[in-house]
Amino acid sequence: MTSLDELFPDGARRGTDVSLDDQHTARRLGEIVGHERRVPVQTAPVSRREELVGLVNSAVADAKPITSAPPPSTGERRTRRRVDVLNVVMAGLAVASLATAGIVGGVQAATASPADEALQVLAADEESIDTGTAGLAASTARLESAISAADSEAEKLRAALEGVREAPDPADIPPGETEAPEDAGMIALAEPEALDTVLAAVDAFRTDLAAIELPATPLAYQRPNIDEGSLEDVAAAIDATSEKLNEIDQATAE
């Protein structure tokens, strides 16, 4: 069967019903070549002419004229700085001084004797002795001042407490008088047992203050006469400074 036979299986058109034949033909064509695609009709976009005109007018109103323009380049190149001879000379002298210092330091290190190095250690220990002695003296002075002030305040407190033990009876003071006569009676102001307890505590506090013994201040250090070029003499002096530092540390701890 040919393609025409497929399109017209019933043969030639018979009858007068044209619409049915056309529908059948369209259906068969759709099965062979595909159904017809419907393309949406494109409508013309809405004109935005008025909005564009408004934007242009707004931009023109806000525009600011250019007040000045940068000057045109003259094409001249910046001249190079001349070499400063003085700076070059100073830099050379600095390098030379550093080299000289390095050489001198190397020579000194090579020629230094063990006694010289030990002497530097001795000097550092003596500085530590001076610092520790000054700190010990300052701490001792503050402690002595604190003990003295505390004892003085305790003595004043005890006298004040004794003053409130009893007082003259106001009933025995004549009208218009401010002082009680010698034969006026006495009345207790504080409970005797409680007052005695407080006074005993004050006395115990003062006794503890008096029992404090400050450590003896080590004798002042003085470098002995030594041969600074002798390693043995310098080493002995270092041992003496070590003992002195131990004394200062112990006194400071006490």
Image: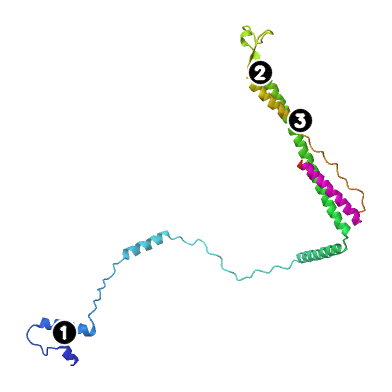
The residue to which callout 2 is attached is 165
**Residue span colored magenta:** 230-252
**Amino acid at the residue labelled 3:** Ala
Q: Label 2: few (<14), some or many (≥20) within 10 Å?
A: some
What's under tag 2, amino acid-wise?
Arg
Based on the picture, tell me whether residue 250 belongs to the magenta stretch.
yes
Residue at x-position 85% and y-position 57%: 117
What distance separates the C-alpha of mark 3 from that of mark 2?
A: 26 Å
Three-letter amino acid code at disc 1?
Thr
How crowded pointer 1 is (Cα within 10 Å; few <14, some 14-19, many 20+) is rated as some
Q: Quadrant of residue 119?
A: bottom right
In the image, is 66 to the left or to the right of 21?
right
Left or right position of 242 against 66: right
Q: Position of residue 67 (x, y in %)?
A: 50, 61
Q: Where does label 3 land, which residue?
A: 210
Residue located beneath label 1 in the image: 25
